């Protein structure tokens, strides 16, 4: 496969995943801000920081208020990571690789773009935010469903999934980090009803609240939730689940092309570290330190995949 095609698939699905992840991050911030109305500005600042767009935001706004953050992360075309920007990027990449996609995947992507362009054509109020975020998540899921239901399991599929899971792992890690390292107002709140409400909000933001309660009825605690989001191999948004899929798809590419590259050797130690870790060892090391190292390694792997398969993001 040409590097240009591989890159188009990789970034198409990375952008689609990012649109959903931004919606999930806003949802987490919005819910937590509701529980801490007196410190809402800090919550919105942490959402912007987690999205990695603090510098761009502060160049435009001098306060972290809900309407500005919501508009910047959803609609602002000057923000390259806004939902509208990445959905347009996903559609442009889909057009670039149109012949590699089934008709269903292309139509779902195009419909996603048209729907969200119309939805985000005007500022979104806090009252309308939950419904808007739900629509963004649904549109991303429709494209993903079309991919699973109609595409051959070949190198096209593998590059699409690599983009998806690299982006998803980054998002889960950042949501965990912003909760534990930034959002928690004081060590005195650990284990309190406020702390538990915030952790439940994080579970909801990654669609994992019901699954967690199935496995842990009546038991909401930060360590258990962190373990679930990092180490549970059954949860589609956990770090270890994402890396198991990344290693699988890189392995399929190695088989297809008969070529082992540096990215293959980089991915396996990351997965092994996750598999060998326990939640106690992670907390002993420091959750923030563990997550920071993971985000750094995940970004490095993404760059190595692009270099090895000769495409540029």
Image (spheres, helix red, strand yellow):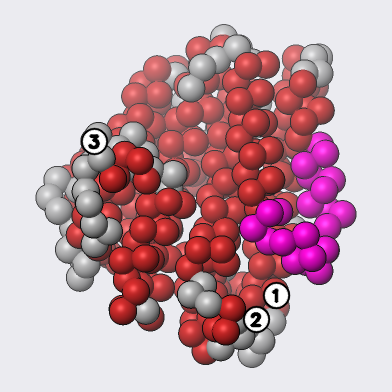
Q: Please say whether residue 20 is visible from this viewpoint.
A: no
Q: Is residue 89 left or right of residue 247?
A: left
User: Relative to 288, is 10 above or below?
Assistant: above
What is the quadrant of residue 233 in the picture? bottom right
**Residue corresponding to mark 3:** 77
| In the foreground, 13 or 77 | 77
User: Relative to 158, is 143 above or below?
Assistant: below
| Distance between mark 2 and mark 1 Cα atoms | 5 Å
Callout 3: 10 Å neighbours few (<14), some, many (20+)? some
What is the quadrant of residue 42 in the picture? bottom left
Name which residue lies at 40% across and 17% down: 96
**Residue corresponding to mark 1:** 224
Upstream in the sequence, badge 3 or badge 2? 3
Residues tagged 2 and 1 counted as in contact (Cβ below 8 A): yes
| In the foreground, 27 or 101 | 27
**Residue corresponding to mark 2:** 221
Q: Secondary structure at mark 3?
A: loop
Is the magenta region chiefly helix, strand or loop? helix
User: Relative to 261, is 163 above or below?
Assistant: below
Q: Secondary structure at mark 2?
A: loop
| Distance between mark 3 and mark 1 Cα atoms | 39 Å
């Amino acid at each position: 496969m040409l590097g240009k095609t591989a890159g188009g698939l990789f970034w198409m699905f990375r952008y689609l995943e990012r649109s959903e992840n931004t919606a999930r991050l806003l949802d987490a911030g919005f819910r937590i801000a509701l529980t801490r109305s007196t410190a809402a500005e800090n919550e919105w600042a942490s959402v912007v920081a987690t999205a990695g767009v603090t510098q761009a935001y502060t160049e435009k706004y001098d306060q972290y208020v809900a309407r500005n953050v919501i508009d910047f992360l959803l609609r602002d075309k000057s923000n390259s990571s806004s939902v509208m920007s990445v959905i347009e990027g996903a559609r442009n990449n889909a057009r670039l690789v149109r012949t590699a996609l089934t008709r269903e995947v292309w139509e779902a992507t195009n419909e996603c773009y048209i729907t969200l362009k119309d939805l985000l054509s005007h500022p979104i109020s806090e009252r309308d935010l939950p419904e808007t975020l739900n629509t963004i998540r649904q549109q991303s899921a429709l494209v993903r469903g079309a991919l699973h239901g109609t595409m051959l399991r070949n190198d096209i599929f593998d590059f699409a999934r690599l983009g998806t899971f690299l982006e998803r792992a980054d998002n889960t890690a950042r949501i965990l980090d912003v909760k534990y390292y930034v959002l928690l107002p004081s060590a005195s709140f650990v284990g309190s009803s406020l702390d538990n409400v915030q952790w439940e909000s994080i579970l909801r933001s990654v669609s994992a609240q019901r699954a967690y309660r199935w496995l842990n009825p009546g038991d909401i605690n930060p360590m258990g939730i962190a373990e679930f989001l990092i180490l549970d191999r059954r949860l589609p948004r956990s770090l270890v689940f994402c890396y198991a899929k990344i290693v699988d798809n890189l392995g399929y590419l190695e088989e297809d092309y008969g070529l082992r590259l540096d990215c293959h050797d980089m991915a396996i130690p990351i997965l092994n570290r996750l598999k060998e870790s326990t939640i106690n060892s992670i907390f002993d090391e420091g959750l923030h330190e563990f997550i920071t190292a993971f985000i750094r390694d995940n970004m490095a792997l993404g760059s190595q995949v692009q270099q090895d398969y000769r495409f540029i993001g």
